[in-house]
Image (spheres, helix red, strand yellow):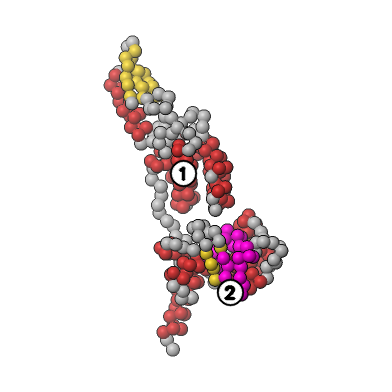
Amino acid sequence: MGSIRKRGFKFQAQVRREGAKPISKTFTLKKDAEVWVRCIEARIDVGEVNVTAPKTLTLRDLLVRYSTEITPEKKGRNQEQRRINRLLRDQISDCRLSQLSSTVMAEFRDRRVHDGIRAAQIDLILIRHCIKLARLEWGVNMLTNPVEGIRIPNGIIRRDRRLKEGEYELLQDAADQCRNPYIWNCIDFAIETGMRRSEILSILWVNVDLDTRIVVLPDTKNGSKREIPLTTKATQILHRLPRDEDRAFATTDYTIRHGWDRLAKRAGIIGLRFHDLRHEAVSRFFEMGLSVPEVAAISGHKDYRMLASYTHVNAKNLAQKINSQFHT
């Protein structure tokens, strides 16, 4: 609450909040002091001023603790750690919590959105959760969560990138120069199965049945077990892999990520990401005539609506299918 006291010929305005050091300012005119109190209280209420955060604590301190205590327990820990590392390189991480207002977060959002709406969404949600934990469990006295006071971009940019004609062959030719055989096999397997890179790298031989052509993923991104049927080509890929390790694809995420970047560059392919191979596979499943529930069972989508962002059916392939089925 705010208070105004007359001290000599001046007026001292003060705003107090429980557990926080008071904010004060001296004015010559009482009406100026009253306006200042109302302004500070309003800014505190909307999160523009944090009066309780320790002056020396920064967002970096919270992110480092989050990456140590929370991130390692997540399935997508490697990806999240890369996001946190990127945030730690950003100037926002050096902002003191006492200065981390909604205005500051909005400025960060507007700057980050230039790198993509999805990137801005992920960063803001991560920071919001980090601050929420700090307030609820780590004893950090912040009156408000400044991220909750701003608009998080909700636009979704749906990628429709698929393999263009001839690109598969270009990648295959480029792979002939690659020393690590797992890189091309992982790429080829992703196209055939629609599996995520992390899922492919987690496949254990004990969960592979080449007779029934089934791969079992005991623990997936959405937390449930998934059985993935294999095409003839996917089965052939697994047949040619060595079995001297527990994992079928005995390499690292780093190797595949950087191997893919080098391979695409060598092939002269622009704008194609490894994750686009999942789009390619899902779209092919629909082109084969599989139903939505069947494709969802393979891809692991619990919400059928999410398949829309992964499905970009090729008009040329559809035309061939229509003509083959409805014309003699």
Q: Earlier in the sequence, mark 1 or mark 2?
A: 1
- Closer to the eye: label 1 or 2: 2
What kind of element bears circle 2?
Answer: loop
In the depicted view, which residue is nearer to us: 175 or 18?
18
Point out residue 96 in the picture as x, y percentages from the top left corner. Answer: 49, 33
Task: Tell me the residue at 48%/46% (across/down).
Answer: 126
The residue at the far top in this view is 8
Whether residue 133 appears in this view of the structure is yes
Residue type highlighted by circle 2 = Thr
Distance of mark 1 from mark 2, alpha carbons?
Answer: 43 Å
- For label 1, the residue is 129
The magenta span reads: 193-216
Residue 285 higher or lower than 247, as above or below: below
- For label 2, the residue is 212
Whether residue 161 appears in this view of the structure is no
Residue 195: in magenta span: yes
